[in-house]
Image: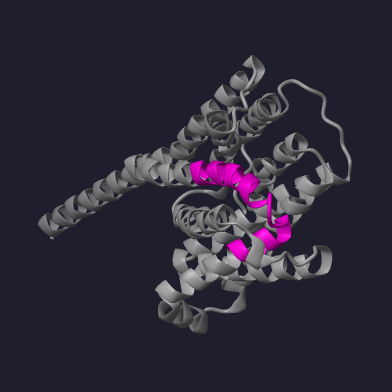
Amino acid sequence: MKRSWMFVMLVVLQTAIYGAANVVMKVAYTDIPPLWCTALRFGIAFVVFMLLFGRNIGSQLRCAGLRAWLPSSICMGATFITSSLSVNLTSATNAGFFIALPMLFAPAFALVLMHRPYRLSIAALQLAVLVGLYLLCCNGGALSIGPGELVGLASSAFFAAALVLSERDLSDANAHVDAKGLSATQTGVTFVFALAGALLFEPTPAFTQVPAISWAAIAFLALFGTCLAFFLQNTALAHLPSATVSVVLCAEPVFTAVLSAMFLSEYLSAMGIAGAAIVVACTVAATLLDERPQVRKGRKAVSNGLAQRLLRVCRRGYAVRATDGD
């Protein structure tokens, strides 16, 4: 139980960093277009990973096949490209709601890719999170469905697939890639995707005229919002189900709302506060639900161990009686 909660807290810290990154991105987007900002963010993060762990990562990739890192990296790259497009195609409120829904897809992907049962309790938790996110992001307002919303939903699906694939690869007994290696490949592939999108769809910014505060924002997004956040996420996925991680990540808008109130004077209504409370409660519930199968498994293991001991005692008694009879 304690060990599981430790990894849950890593995801909570990652979620808080993502929430702060959403506020910092508003500063960076003032002078740098979104896709260029994403390319700079992930390009710097990839360089940092390689400078710190390049030799170790290189040896991992030489031993691992493409299956160990490429599928999750492609899904992660698609996540950030589609989320940037969603923000450009619809309102920030609607985009924030639809981008924050990986928990809708993660259990289904885990069922297909890892043959993990889709429990009724998970479905109930998904419904509760959906209600909480609606109240938090929309403050009770009406949602419209258009291209931006659909792209945001696609971003959630890509993120859920990336989480499940990362869990599968990191928890595999024969895995050759650890959290550092997978984080590096995911940042590298996302950088390639973002750079291609920036070159195709956005004008090249005048980098020499970008103010220092925007470069500071890019540095924060690269070092904390990418390097540290990805490492925390992949470390947790080696020990927690992706469905649990996806529910905890739903608390990202809660941290964004708190930090926006502190630094941007953007305050939640009473319905938004209620939605935040529901999301936090669901995060705790998801962790507790994750513990229940482990407890049952532990009890089953204890029961099997006792049964085996009793069987050995009975066999020894039978052997002694047979010897006495002879």
Judge whether residue 167 can be spotted in this image: no
Query: Would residue 274 appear left or right of 53 to someone viewing this image?
Result: right
> Is residue 31 in the magenta section?
yes
Furthest toward the front, the residue is 209
Residue 312 visible? The answer is: yes
Q: Quadrant of residue 322?
A: bottom left
Residue at 54%, 33% (x, y): give it.
Answer: 263
Residue 141 in which image quadrant: top right
Q: In which quarter of the image is the N terminus?
A: top left
Say which quarter of the image contains residue 303.
top left
Front residue of this view, candidates 20 and 276:
20
Task: Please identify the residue farthest to the top as the structure is shown.
Answer: 270
Pick the front one: 78 or 169: 78
Q: Which residue is drawn at 49% across and 47% down?
A: 14
Residue that appears at 44% across and 38% down: 291
Q: In this view, does 265 lie above or below 1?
A: above
User: Residue 230 location, x and y as percent?
Assistant: 51, 57
* Residue 225 place in picture, x, y as percent: 53, 53
Per the rendered image, the range of residues in magenta is 15-41
For this view, does 218 lie left or right of residue 2? Answer: right
Q: How is the image coloured?
A: one colour
Residue 142 position, x and y percent, is: 82, 24
Identify whether 271 is placed above or below 32. Answer: above
User: Would you say 189 lies left or right of 239 here?
Assistant: right
Q: Is the magenta stretch mostly helix, strand or loop?
A: helix
Q: Is residue 318 depicted above or below 138 in this figure?
A: below
In the displayed structure, 180 sits above or below 241; it is: below
Name of the residue lying farthest toward the left: 324
Q: What x and y, as percent, mark residue 287?
A: 47, 36
